């Protein structure tokens, strides 16, 4: 029996019900950021086990919020390990954007006007499904740093420290993620075939 | 004078809020003259706003259609059981 869990039994729901109550939500959270089903499942499992052992739940926050905080740390641990095993030092900004720019650094493939760009877009479920598909198409590490930075709003400084990545490499990864996402949204939503051809 | 490729990098970097003053000035000057880079800035800003909303939508069942498989559910349940 876990001593840590015993001490906070009155504040937490029965662990027997954790999977039922939080499993899918935590899985979706991990899945949307990591993009690999097996890894997302493992991270959810590790989250529950860490929760059983952790003495940090004080009952002053929502149980789900607490699980998400643990899961987020587990995701950062996973990414740090990935970065150690497969360093990204080979990333170099000069390799980026070669298809978009010519040899003089001028636009070769210009971003098009987004004809149906408006805040109303954000009300459309179809748009969000497209957005999700575009996020999912990003390579794993780019997707995760983008999600951590732009969605979770974790500072670049903190991310670099947590993931043991240099600011230069982080900057390149975020640049690549943002431009790839932009391109995907342009192609699949804002300037879909037959739309915006007149612009 | 910066070219458009350099500007595209700075547009991403300035989102991290630590661009040196002189680069900010150069960036602004370029954006005044280059409508394509100006468009890119507008689109990247919009993507940042979308990303923040996307996070909030993740838990909504309307957007999130994936869930744990039965096998994963059982495996996790057994693992919790072992650690109780």
Image: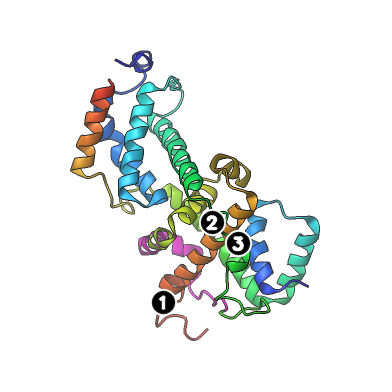
Q: Residue A54, image x and y in percent?
A: 41, 22
Disc 1 designates what residue?
A192
Between A87 and A74, the residue placed more toward the observer is A87
What's the chain of the residue with tag 3?
A
What's the chain of the residue with tag 1?
A
Q: Which mark is residue B49?
A: 2
- Alpha carbon distance from label 1 to label 3: 31 Å
Between disc 1 and disc 3, the foreground one is 3
Residue A28: in magenta span: no
Disc 3 designates what residue?
A92
Q: Based on the displayed image, in which of its 4 quarters is residue A112 positioned?
A: bottom right
**Secondary structure beneath disc 1?**
loop
**Secondary structure beneath disc 3?**
loop
Q: Residue A125, image x and y in percent?
A: 36, 60
Q: Are marks 2 and 3 on the same chain?
A: no
Q: Residue A126, image x and y in percent?
A: 35, 64
Q: Residue at x 42, y 71 (%)?
A: A189
Q: Earlier in the sequence, mark 1 or mark 3?
A: 3
Give the magenta-colored segment's residue range: A110-132
For mark 1, does the 10 Å Cα neighbourhood hold few (<14), some (14 to 19), or many (20 or more) residues?
few
Q: Residue at x 50, y 62 (%)?
A: A119
Q: Residue at x 35, y 23 (%)?
A: A52
């Amino acid at each position: 029996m876990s001593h840590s869990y015993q001490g906070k039994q009155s504040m937490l729901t029965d662990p027997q019900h954790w999977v039922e109550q939080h499993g899918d939500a935590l899985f979706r959270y991990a899945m949307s950021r990591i993009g690999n089903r097996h890894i997302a499942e493992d991270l959810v499992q590790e989250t529950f086990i860490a929760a059983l052992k952790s003495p940090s739940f004080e009952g002053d926050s929502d149980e789900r919020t607490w699980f998400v905080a643990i899961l987020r740390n587990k995701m950062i641990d996973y990414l740090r390990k990935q970065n150690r095993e497969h360093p990204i030092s080979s990333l170099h900004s000069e390799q980026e954007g070669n298809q978009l720019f010519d040899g003089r650094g001028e636009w070769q493939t210009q971003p098009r006007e987004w004809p149906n760009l408006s805040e109303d877009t954000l009300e459309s479920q179809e748009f969000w499904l497209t957005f999700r598909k575009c996020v999912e198409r990003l390579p794993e590490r780019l997707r995760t740093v983008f999600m951590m930075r732009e969605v979770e709003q974790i500072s670049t400084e903190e991310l670099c420290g947590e993931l043991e990545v240099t600011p230069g490499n982080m900057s390149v990864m975020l640049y690549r993620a943002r431009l790839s996402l932009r391109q995907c949204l342009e192609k699949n939503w804002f300037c879909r075939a037959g739309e915006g051809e007149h612009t | 004078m910066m070219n458009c490729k350099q500007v595209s990098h700075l547009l991403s970097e300035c989102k991290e809020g630590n661009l040196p003053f002189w680069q900010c000035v150069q960036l602004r000057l370029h954006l005044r003259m280059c409508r394509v880079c100006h468009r890119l800035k507008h689109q990247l800003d919009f993507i940042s706003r979308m990303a923040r909303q996307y996070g909030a939508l993740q838990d909504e069942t309307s957007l999130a259609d994936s869930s744990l498989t039965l096998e994963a559910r059982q495996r996790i349940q057994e693992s919790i059981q072992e650690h109780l």
